[in-house]
Amino acid sequence: MSVVLTISAVAAILYVLWTLLLRWQHAQNARRWNCGSIPHYPGDWLGTNTLKEALRYDKDRNLPYLSRHRIEKMSASQNRYTTTFQFRQLGQDIILTCEPKNVQAVLAHQFKDFELGTPRRNAFHSLLGNGIFTADGEYWTRSRGLLRPQFTRDQISDLDLEERHVQQAMRLMPVDATGWTEPTDIQTIFFRLTLDSATEFLFGESVESQAAALRSGSKTQDDFATQFDRGQWYAAQRARFEKIYWIVNNKESREVENFVHAYVDRFVDAALNMDAEKKPSHYVFLHALAEMTRDPVELRSQLLNILLAGRDTTASLLSWCVLLLARHPEQYARLRAAVVEEFGSYASPKEITFAGLKGCKPLQNVLNETLRLYSIVPGNRRIAVKNTTIPTGGGPNGTDPVYVKKGQAVFYSTFVMHRRPDLWGADADEFRPERWESRKPGWEYLPFNGGPRICIGQQFALTEAGYVMVRLLQRFDQIEGVGKTAEGEIAMAVSLTNAPGDNVTVRLHEGN
């Protein structure tokens, strides 16, 4: 027994000495690199209070506001606007920032100092596999090399494909004798539309979820969407619990992931075994990717990663856009006038092209303003792969560099950064598309991330969202919000993306 106690005592002493040595080394590094200390968010030694706080905000469906709340609390305690500070969560010291210089350093200037890290892989891997949104290092470089050629202008501007699915969506919005639709949850329509178009683009075959909805009663085609959404919910919960992510996993999560994988594997197997002469003449993402890799697991993983971005990003953007326009009908009328002038009426449209959508300034202003207020990814983080720094936030005035230890996370809130009054004006919380008339944003605006990991599908998302909005505006000349869409606090449902937390229910009037 005495031997065990002796070994335990020696181990404890060695641990304390090692901890003290590390602290001394970090202090020396910070001094050598002229770093200043940063404020600490109040909490217990383990950081359970911050986790409880996050879970409470998530339950109340306003999680992106948590970072703003913490910044306001720290600013009050420091008697200055505090854009960078440290908080503790489940034993991990995390730096939170909403400072563009710091975000630029992490994502671009010091890109090699940071990675997604193990927490991201732990949260997402069982659903998405090893793909572009979970990989680091050489595998990420390989993934990006595989995927980038699939997002050329020619591939993302197939608007004929989009039109077929838009017409299905329009059939879900019939009008009565007065020209008005019934109160319609347009968010559900958008998520079905983008799922159908994304699966046709990626797999060569649409899941036809809108056709199932039109048949009213058939649920079969909705199974994949339901299971994929549930899988994302589990992934988001694992991300909240950091190192103890595994407590979220259960029988249902495994069944969901198995269903999603089996569904996509069916398309992968068909592509790998397809005769060359049977391949369709039009572009199919999976078929092009299968010419670059024959690994079925890699193909499935990349498809799921891109499906997440291609479907959820665009559907969320469209939902936020319509919600904001429903609350600002004068903006809807102004945008519709510009769209009809540029692209014609619904019955007699002029040609709608990639270049035309990109060049329609009023449309781009509305999309930019929507993404500013409601970032599809309202916050993100990176893990330091070595001892390093970020440029600002330390010292008594918050202007000194900040020391970042190897393994430490830096969380950046685009939601807060996009709404900072000192960057965007006193009306930063207001929906005002006109602010984009002369603005050329820098790192204070990051709807699609930045640096080497900037979203390769951003033009795909903006083209699809722009096209759907043009067709909607061509058909309907008035919009009315119904219920929570019209007034009250706006809830946010944050899983792997940020979408309206309540149905986006509107009435639309068909124009001439």
Image: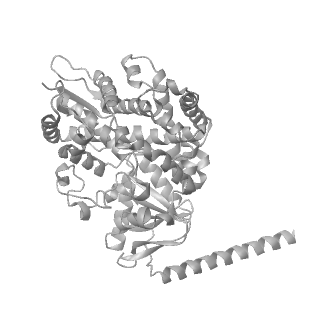
Q: Position of residue 358 (x, y in %)?
A: 25, 44
* Residue 324 at least partly seen: no
Q: Position of residue 333 (x, y in %)?
A: 14, 37
Residue 318: image quadrant is: top left
Q: How many marks?
A: 0
Out of 23 and 126, give the one closest to the viewer: 126
Residue 168: image quadrant is: top left
| Residue 212 drawn above or below residue 195 | above
Looking at the image, which residue is at 23% across and 37% down? 486
| Residue 31 drawn above or below residue 321 | below
Q: Is residue 437 left or right of residue 502?
A: left
Out of 205 and 154, give the one closest to the viewer: 154
Q: Is residue 52 left or right of residue 343?
A: right
* Residue 249 at least partly seen: yes
Task: Please say which color scheme the image uses.
Answer: one colour
Out of 378 and 461, give the one closest to the viewer: 461
Residue 186: image quadrant is: top left
Q: Position of residue 86 (x, y in %)?
A: 46, 67
Specify the quadrant that holds the C terminus: top left
Specify the quadrant that holds the N terminus: bottom right
Q: Position of residue 105 (x, y in %)?
A: 41, 67
Out of 439 and 218, give the one closest to the viewer: 439
Looking at the image, which residue is at 50% across and 66% down? 113
| Residue 421 drawn above or below residue 283 | below
Looking at the image, which residue is at 37% across and 51% down? 448
Residue furthest toward the front?
277
Q: Is residue 397 left or right of residue 327?
A: right
